[in-house]
Image (cartoon, grey):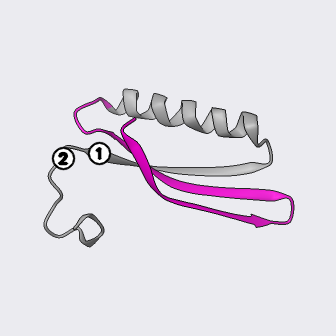
Amino acid sequence: MHGFHDLKTRTAGSVIFVNMHIELDGSQSLDEAHAIGAGLRRAILKAYPQTDVMLHKDPVGVKPHPDDPSRQ
């Protein structure tokens, strides 16, 4: 993992919601990217069992598509 950004947390009742973008090598396989995300999710859930975790995987080193406003 190269890093992360757009970390957002909030609570609703007893549940903590965590949303974040993780930066992964753009040349790695989907299986590798999934394994990294799943490992991170498990680590967060181990530390905070009442958490709902959503991770968005962003490739590093991949040229953004010109029509994608979120990547400019």
Q: Is residue 69 above or below residue 32?
A: below
Q: Identify the residue at horizontal 76%, vertical 43% (top origin).
A: 48
What amino acid is found at the position of numbered circle 2 in the picture? Val
- Number of marks drawn: 2
Please say if 52 is above or below 6: above
Q: Quadrant of the C terminus?
A: bottom left
| Residue 35 position in % (x across, y down) | 47, 28
- Residue displayed at 22% across by 33% down: 27
Q: Position of residue 55 (x, y in %)?
A: 51, 49
Q: Residues within 10 Å of mark 2 (few under 14, many from 20)?
A: few
Does the magenta-highlighted stretch encompass residue 16? yes
Q: Is residue 25 rendered magenta in the image?
A: yes
Give, as a three-letter code, the residue at label 1. Pro
The image quadrant that residue 67 belongs to is bottom left
Q: Residues within 10 Å of mark 1 (few under 14, many from 20)?
A: some
Residue visible at 18% across and 57% down in the picture? 64
Tell me which segment is drawn in magenta: 1-29
Q: Quadrant of residue 5?
A: bottom left
Write down the residue under mark 2: 62
**66 left or right of 1 in image:** left
Report if the CB atoms under discs 2 and 1 are less than 8 Å apart: yes
Outermost residue to the right: 14
Q: Which residue is mark 1?
A: 59
Say whether residue 58 is left or right of residue 38: left
Q: Dominant secondary structure of the magenta stretch?
A: strand
Mark 2 element type: loop
Residue 1 x/y as whole percent: 40, 35
